[in-house]
Image: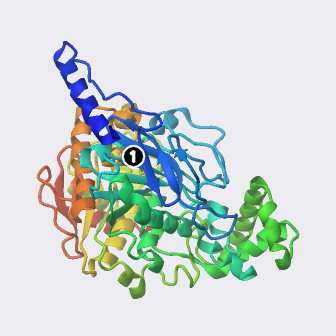
Amino acid sequence: MNTNTLIKTIALVALPLLTLGQAAKPVSLPLVSGKDAAVVGTAYGKVRGYIHNGIFTFKGIPYAKAKRFMAPSKPDSWTGVRSSMSYGPVCPLMDPTTTVNDESEFVFHHDWGYPNEDCLRLNIWSKGVNDGKKRPVMVWLHGGGHTAGSSQELPSYDGENISKKGDVVLVSINHRLNILGFLDLSAYGDQYKASPNNSVHDMIAALQWVKANIAGFGGDPDNVTIFGQSGGGGKVNTLLNTPSAKGLFSKAIIQSGGLGLQFNDQTITRRISALVLEEFNLNPGQVDSLQSVPFEKLAAAGKKAIQKVQAQLTKEGKPLGPFGWSWAPVLDGNLLPYQPVSAEAKAISANIPLLIGSTKNEFAPFFGMGAGPVNSMADVRNALTKQYGDKADAYIAAVKKAYPETQKPEDFLNIDDMFRRSAIKMADLKAASPAPVYMYLFTWQSPVVDGKYKSLHCMEIPFVFDNIGRCEEMTGGGKEAYVLADKMSQSWINFARTGNPGHKGLPSWKPYTPQNGAAMLFDNQCVEKTHHDKDILAIAPDRAL
């Protein structure tokens, strides 16, 4: 009996239990594991996963291999069947987590994983394998800027529920980050030609693996959507502007991904690499010695080099960006020949439909406007006057116009304009292309911890993945959250399937243009609005990432 038939048999056995006095207690399919439970062949050997709630699950599959600072290459083949039931290693972090804030950790519930530089792994969830079906494939790129994070970092990243609901194949990946993914050693020999963007090369290698192997996991290699949030959204935008990624995906979704509007200047990245060599008293001919430096020492040298370059740039009067200089994709003239705003870059992905948006509050609940405690509208006006001068009352009126439900004084001060403006700029760039762009804004307010976290950065991810119950600490797990997740996850599924996120559970959702300013606001009452917050953005300074 093959595993697809086994799942159907289990379902037929489990269903009668619902009528035998157990209807009040949800009955899930038993987990299936064992040597013949979930085996799929790949170009490099067979892998064995497990089946949970009817979803075939595979974790930690190697999609490539790479020496430090070198381009990725195909993974080693193996004989027999490779057990692939648990997450693989994550990229080492330059700032490993040693302490956390109790309350915010309760909300986010991180899984930090175990670090190893051999981290090129991917995970797959699918409703069927070896069945010849062509399900839409969704490849998730995790957040954390370009420096941190992993495919398992947040419980919201789990792909079981969205795979089950939408009959899609969900893939998530780990890849090199920070100094391992972006130390630019290209001036020191052809063997390091890829080093400025090894992180991006890794993602392309993962997409190539998907193209070649996903059919065995029930996926359609010609219908692949890449999507990601925060740094993951920035990675999506990078791939949209990468010539060698063309043909590896057909649709893209950017969630709070403002980090993708500009690639790093190579003159600066080479300054940093020279300073890293200097930290170890190495001359250019000794660059290979960096291969054997312990990661902790390499990370420390990278931090010192960045600090020195930041000081130099400040002295030279050059901008550092909202978060200072950081490891990120490099305009290297090789993998990335064009800045995202250029006509040449836009032409690469002209035929790729795009869904893009952000959350209403992002990081603003924690930063606000530096106002301190806000207990009255007088406090609001004082804070806004410090920020906007005589435009304080106009800003209050703009908030009431954009969000008529606003009542609490603090809610006038924690509306994000930075990620929102970045999303609009990306949508404007895309709008001139033949393929459509759809915009959204996630405005739902979480009730957890007395509503403190609002629509925080990352808050929409459990809704996209239909993971409300898995993320109750963030969502509260209430009925309204489940209803909205049903609508929002269906939009992402529909977009992956057809390139249009609309469905019968939502109002009409038009493609965005700079003229119509159309965006779907996801909340307890979903509504399409046009230019709803233009007055806010007209007053707030341009803080786009």
Quarter of the image where one finds residue 160: top left
Q: Which residue is mark 1?
A: 379
| Residue occupying the point 55% across, 65% down | 202
Q: Is residue 360 left or right of residue 262?
A: left
Position of residue 373 relative to residue 220, above or below, is above
Work out whether 8 lies above or below 389: above
How dense is the environment of label 1, judged by Cα within 10 Å: few (below 14), some, or many (20 and up)? some
Farthest residue to the bottom: give it: 344
Residue 45, how many percent across, how many down?
Answer: 52, 54
Left or right, 40 with respect to 308, comes to: left
In the depicted view, which residue is nearer to us: 431 or 142? 142
Name the residue nearer the viewer: 230 or 193: 193
User: Quick one: 395 or 45, which is closer to the camera?
Assistant: 45
Question: Residue 307 is drawn in which quadrant?
Answer: bottom right
Q: Which residue is painted at 70% across and 66% down in the image? A: 306
The single residue placed furthest to the right in the displayed view is 281
Q: Nearer the viewer, residue 52 or 326?
A: 52
Classify residue 244 as left or right of residue 461.
right
Res. 467 in view: no
Quadrant of the rendering where the N terminus is positioned: top left
Residue at 66 percent of width and 50 percent of height:
116
Q: Secondary structure at mark 1?
A: helix
Q: In the rendered image of this protein, does residue 344 appear above or below residue 193?
A: below
> Which residue occupies 63% across, 80% down?
266
Left or right: 328 in relation to 234: right
Q: Specify the amino acid type for callout 1.
A: Asp
